[in-house]
Image (cartoon, grey):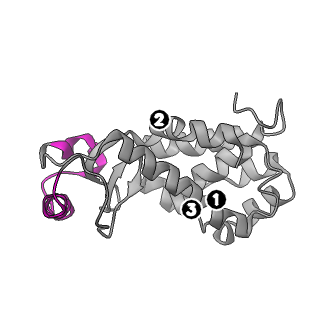
Amino acid sequence: MRPALLDTFPAWSEHFEGDLLFFYLDLKRLVTIGVGLLFDPYVPGLNFGGASEAEVRAAWFVVKNDQTLDPRRGGAQYGALTSVRMTEAGVQALVRAKMLANEVVLRRYLTNWDAAPAKAQRAAMSHAWAFGAAFPPKWPKWTAAFNAGNYALASLQDVPSPAEMAVQNTSFHARIAAEQADLANALQGDPDSLT
């Protein structure tokens, strides 16, 4: 992974996901935390700033079972349900770990991953954030264009189905537009730069 991507992706992705230190439900009613990090099912043993495992688990279940709030109104509203908070350092460690884990999976499918410019890598990482790192087989035209180094063509293939677009919010639509722009401009300028 290009160093610029590892260093800047968390802040870049915050524009689309936010950065919440408490559990919230995403649009699929899956428990999430931080910068769009799925936390469903529950995973014990993470850093929640001094909260006991029992307190963290109880907070997770409160959010998971909530029927009073509408996930379409964003994650911030879930902060009032519990007092359990993850540390910012914990969120950043999770984001970095997820990026590295996603890269392992992406490498299986994106044969030119190492040669891909930083903008193309960011688009792929972003797509993995939204659709899971094993998305390439489900997006064969996108994957073929990416692997051929034809990032401009990949940008034209970076279009979710109408059904996926209909259930998503404006942040998701903005993420897709940013991915398309990165792919369309991937070969311009320094391949290590994200500007």
Q: Which mark is residue 103?
A: 1
Report the disc number at residue 47.
none
Q: CA distance from mark 2 to mark 3?
A: 22 Å
- Residue occupied by mark 2: 15
Where is residue 184, by image quadrant?
top right
Q: Judging from the image, what secondary structure is the residue with disc 2 in?
A: helix
**Residue drawn where x is 73% and y is 46% of the image:** 120
The kind of residue on which mark 2 rests is: His
Tell me, yes or no, whether the highlighted magenta stretch contains residue 145: no
Q: Nearer the viewer, residue 124 or 86?
A: 86
In percent of width and height, residue 62 lies at: 14, 60
| Highlighted range, magenta | 51-79
Q: Residue at x 78, y 43 (%)?
A: 117
Report how many numbered discs are placed on residues in the image. 3
Asked if labels 3 and 1 touch by Cβ distance under 8 angstroms, the answer is: yes
Q: Which residue is mark 3?
A: 101
Quarter where residue 118 is shown? top right
Q: Nearer the viewer, residue 35 or 87?
A: 87
- Mark 2 or 1 closer to N-term? 2
Locate residue 35 relative to residue 161 in the image: left or right.
left
